[in-house]
Image (cartoon, helix red, strand yellow):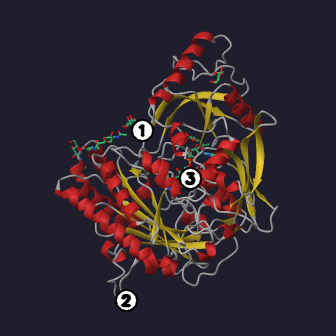
Amino acid sequence: MAFRTDQIFPYSLILTIFVATCSLELIPQNEGTEASACQAPENFPRDLELYKGEFHNWAEDLIVKGLWNAVPRTPTEVLKLVNWAYQHNYTIRPSGYMHTWAPTTVVKNTTECQHERVIVMKTNESLTQMKMTRNYPFPTVWAQSGANMGNIMSFLEENGYGFNASPAPGPITLGGVVAIAGHGTGIPAVGEIPTPGKSFGSISNLVVDFTAVVWDPKEDAYVLKTFQRSDPEAKAFLTSMGRVFILDMTLRVMSNYNLRCESRIDIPATELFADPKTVKPETRTISKIIDSSGRMETILFPFTARPWLKIWTVSPIRPFFSRATRQPYNYPFSDNIPQPVAAMASNISNGAWELTPAFGELEYDMVVSGLATSFSSDLWGPSKNLLLYIQATTLRLTENGAAILTSRKNIQRVIHESFAFFTKLVQEYQAKSKFPINGPLEIRVSGIDNPGDVGIPGAEAPAISPLYPVNANIFFSEYDVCIWFNILTFPSTPHAIEFLQRMETFFYETYNGDYALIRPEWSKGWAYKNNTSWSNDEMLQETIPKSLPHWSYSVATYDKYDPHRVFSNEFLDILFSA
Ligand SMILES: Cc1cc2nc3c(=O)[nH]c(=O)nc-3n(C[C@H](O)[C@H](O)[C@H](O)COP(=O)(O)OP(=O)(O)OC[C@H]3O[C@@H](n4cnc5c(N)ncnc54)[C@H](O)[C@@H]3O)c2cc1C
Ligand SMILES: *[C@@H]1O[C@H](CO)[C@@H](O)[C@H](O)[C@H]1NC(C)=O
Ligand SMILES: *[C@@H]1O[C@H](CO)[C@@H](O)[C@H](O)[C@H]1NC(C)=O
Ligand SMILES: *[C@@H]1O[C@H](CO)[C@@H](O)[C@H](O)[C@H]1NC(C)=O
Ligand SMILES: *[C@@H]1O[C@H](CO)[C@@H](O)[C@H](O)[C@H]1NC(C)=O
Ligand SMILES: *[C@@H]1O[C@H](CO)[C@@H](O)[C@H](O)[C@H]1NC(C)=O
Ligand SMILES: *[C@@H]1O[C@H](CO)[C@@H](O)[C@H](O)[C@H]1NC(C)=O
């Protein structure tokens, strides 16, 4: 990664000096068993929980050992921690389940005591309260930012409410999801009746008010400030990658509803992703599936012909052939990987890259037999049980994240072109006996962040959400959908980043605003260069900022409310410098 190491050394120097000079004053909060070379942070508030832990991201290719973790239990403790950090030149990194691939929490592998002056603020253990609230003329839920999305959705269900769409895993925090503009899949089916609170954009776009920790020059301290969604500054906070800290928020919700989810494993990718110029009336394209059901996802394993296609349909009454399900996560075979698949996965990630085509076949077979034996190819029930379908035990892969905004009439064109380029690239590498991509290609289609969805006069879309409307005036915007294109592979697969960089170059050359526009999916991989992710300076400092109209405004807002950069890291310093 292109981080400047000179930013790291002064910190370790300072740390060394403190370790040498402050000893007896230190709070003896330590991990106990392991005799540590590192001392606890100086003058750390005695009543705050602090422990030494390890940061590891989802793909386990970003690991920081011996990092101090604080667990504030109340808003007062949060402020105490942040003000202590400000006074002692520490940075604070909010952290939930560490499911993000991008280095927005911590930036690079570091061994014990080698990292900078950073405290990870864990939210998911203690800042988890939630309640239904009635401050608006529509139903809302208030939750602290460490609350787990799955728990929020269960709580909503008990109260008769739900979300129109959500990310697929449950154990991710609301704060983490809002920070990266988390999304699900789906746009309105043709003829679908708009119901109040139904939004096809990101979770960030559902926020009606929130409380953040901000710098107050009058108090000379960090304080809590509540923002209404109508406040123009709110738009900078509602996707920030942790450049600000949101303590709690209120979200607009909708009346709960029932969904059906059908899985298909019989339609060839060439048919689903067919060129719209050549389709026949009977061709089963993604575009047609979306017109009839609105919500779909395809998972295409490497070197296989037919994706696992999920189609969700709003279905008030259980269709005759659907199985009613009482809980989420109905695909046990993809969450608890069968032994033969796990064995081959392990061989591949240990270097048997040429097993990739056989691995793709094995995974496809696993889905075919898994759907049959778990009776999960046609499910129906309350929305949450169909919207949550990935658990943390699924394969640990890395992935790129491309959000391609376009208009509904161009969905099939963009998917076809992207798939054709992807296929050509895979074949080019295969011809040289190279297998950079050993995980699936996943495609979803969502709506954009229409600020009208939230029902607050004056609301603006979250400014750096990839779903920010392309035309400032939503009513004249041509771009009403977003295609999420994710390519998964094991970390450290040779040529993988090079492959993803070529894919990214294709996206940026092709979707530059003519009939589609590409932006990064923040939580995943982007800005590739020289075999590393998140390192392409031109992308970080020019291309990406230019693709979002309120970028500079957002950066200025972060600097206004956190001038001391307590909530930042070396990567965010580069990204948010433009
Ligand atoms: C298997 C898997 C499947 C996924 N599926 C989807 C999906 O379907 N849709 C989707 O959109 N995403 C998906 N994601 C990505 C996921 O939604 C994001 O990575 C999300 O940020 C994870 O939440 P977390 O609690 O782990 O956040 P973390 O990774 O802990 O934090 C993410 C970022 O948010 C910041 N942050 C955390 N809390 C706060 C706060 N209170 N205030 C401000 N900043 C904060 C952190 O500093 C960090 O920069 C998936 C990830 C995995 C691993
Ligand atoms: C970080 O550590 C992980 C786990 O040991 C490793 O797979 C990865 O390659 C390392 N990354 C870098 C940039 O060294
Ligand atoms: C923090 O940094 C400032 C400016 O570099 C310095 O003056 C101050 O002494 C530092 N304080 C601590 C506690 O390190
Ligand atoms: C909080 O997240 C950590 C990972 O950072 C996890 O180990 C822990 O189990 C989570 N706690 C809860 C209550 O979910
Ligand atoms: C994985 O590698 C081991 C050791 O080489 C071998 O015995 C085994 O058959 C391989 N398994 C698969 C599924 O390729
Ligand atoms: C990227 O990595 C591949 C091997 O995975 C290597 O052949 C290539 O030279 C590398 N490219 C750069 C620019 O370092
Ligand atoms: C990337 O690779 C090119 C060519 O190998 C080299 O000229 C350039 O300095 C590298 N950039 C970085 C940031 O490593």
Residue corresponding to mark 2 = 281
- Position of residue 408 relative to residue 21, above or below, is below
Q: Position of residue 543 (x, y in %)?
A: 46, 54
Q: Position of residue 67 (x, y in %)?
A: 54, 29
- Residue at 61% x, 78% y is 316
In front of the other: 38 or 336: 38
As shown in the figure, which amino acid type bears the numbered disc 2?
Pro
- Residue at 50% x, 47% y is 100
**Residue contact at pointers 2 and 1, CB within 8 angstroms:** no
First in sequence: mark 1 or mark 3? Answer: 1
- Residue at 68% x, 70% y is 452
- Residue at 52% x, 68% y is 446
* Residue 370 occupies quadrant: bottom left
- Position of residue 366 relative to residue 497, above or below, is below
CB at disc 1 and ligand 7 closer than 8 Å: yes
Look at the numbered disc 1 and give the secondary structure of its residue: loop
